[in-house]
């Protein structure tokens, strides 16, 4: 499965409980078509007591979301955008459809 975003891209969530929130992509899993975004889709995880954490805890952590629920976010024009490809100096660049700046 092909994923349209890469690690460290800024994305905007377009569907679900975190709609209209932006965040940075931490992990991309193209095999499942999912990704993990910082601060998005937080779930509570119960941790057992360990030697480091004597009492145990309930920890909030990011869960994976489908890549179809996010759009790439252009930091220059401050809009969610699709991308086009441009070839410069033999390299393929991803370019914002609105303002034309390389992402």
Image (spheres, grey):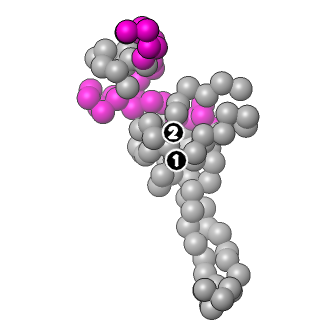
- Outermost residue toward the bottom? 54
The picture places residue 46, in percent across and down from the top left corner, at: 67, 75
Q: Name the element at disc 2.
A: loop
Q: Quadrant of the C terminus?
A: top left
- Horizontal side of 71 relative to 48 (left or right) equals left
Q: Which residue is mark 1?
A: 26
Q: Name the element at disc 1.
A: strand
Q: Which residue is mark 2?
A: 7
* Residues in magenta, as a range: 66-93
Up-down: is 13 above or below 77? below
Q: Are marks 2 and 1 in contact (CB under 8 Å)?
A: yes
Residue 33 occupies quadrant = top right
Label located before the other in sequence (2 or 1)? 2
Dominant secondary structure of the magenta stretch?
Answer: strand
Judge whether residue 76 is colored magenta.
Answer: yes
Residue at x 62% of width, y 54% of height: 63
- Residue toward you, 61 or 16: 61
- Horizontal side of 39 relative to 100 (left or right) equals right
- Residue toward you, 88 or 71: 88
Residue 17 in sight? no
- Outermost residue toward the front? 89
Disc number for residue 53: none
Residue at x 43% of width, y 19% of height: 94
Marks 2 and 1 sit apart, C-alpha to C-alpha, by: 6 Å
């Amino acid at each position: 499965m092909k994923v349209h975003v890469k690690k460290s891209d800024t994305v905007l969530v377009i569907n679900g409980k975190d709609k209209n929130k932006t965040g940075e992509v931490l992990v991309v899993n193209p095999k499942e078509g999912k990704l993990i975004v910082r601060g998005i889709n937080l779930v509570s995880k119960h941790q057992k007591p360990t030697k480091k954490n004597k009492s145990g805890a309930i920890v909030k952590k990011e869960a994976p979301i489908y890549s179809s629920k996010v759009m790439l976010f252009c930091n220059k024009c401050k809009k969610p955008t699709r991308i086009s490809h441009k070839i410069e100096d033999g390299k393929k660049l991803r370019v914002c459809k609105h303002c034309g700046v390389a992402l």
